[in-house]
Image (cartoon, rainbow, N blue to C red):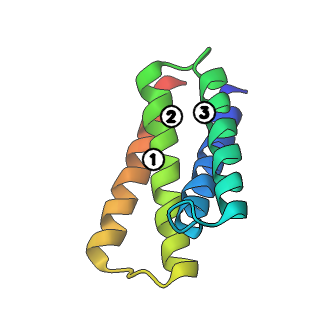
Amino acid sequence: MAWIMLLAAGALEIVWAVAMKQSLGFTRLWPSLVMVTALAASMGLLALSMKTLQLGTAYVAWTGIGAVGTFAVGILFLGEQATATRLLAAFLILAGVLLLKASTD
């Protein structure tokens, strides 16, 4: 159950990061409200998952899910570049998260 909460926390990290971008420096109300709400929910789920998971594993997985997911949203929906080097970096982050997951079971 802790890993499910952590995955949801990572997904919400993607939501709040994209909403922060869309808020244009907190000058737009609705994206700003989405950002604050998603951030609070993401951190709450992270905290709950840390009741069971190790601190380092949970935090690295949370940031990795958020980083790779936000990176993918940037490429797929915001027109950001998908260079070989950037894709390799995202792959390595994802591989690290999966290796941490495998090492904790």
Amino acid type at circle 1 is: Gly
User: Are the residues at dot 1 and dot 3 in contact (C-beta closer than 8 Å)?
Assistant: no
Is residue 6 toward the left or the right of residue 86 in the image? right
Q: CA distance from mark 2 to mark 3?
A: 19 Å
- Residue 102 visible in the snapshot: no
Q: How many numbered marks does the figure carry?
A: 3
- Viewer-nearest residue: 38 or 24: 24
Q: Residue at x 56, y 59 (%)?
A: 26
Whichever of labels 2 and 1 marks the residue nearer the N terminus, that label is 1
Contact flag, marks 2 and 3 (Cβ < 8 Å): no
Q: Is residue 90 left or right of residue 22?
A: left
Q: CA distance from mark 2 to mark 1?
A: 12 Å
Rendered-image quadrant of the C terminus:
top right
Q: In the image, residue 12 lies at what x, y percent?
A: 65, 48
The structure residue drawn at horizontal position 36% and vertical position 70%, both measured from the top left corner, is 87
Separation of marks 1 and 3 at Cα, in angstroms? 14 Å
Q: Which residue is label 3 attached to? A: 43
The amino acid on which the numbered mark 2 sits, given as a three-letter code, is Lys
Quadrant for the N terminus in the image: top right
Q: Which residue is mark 1?
A: 64
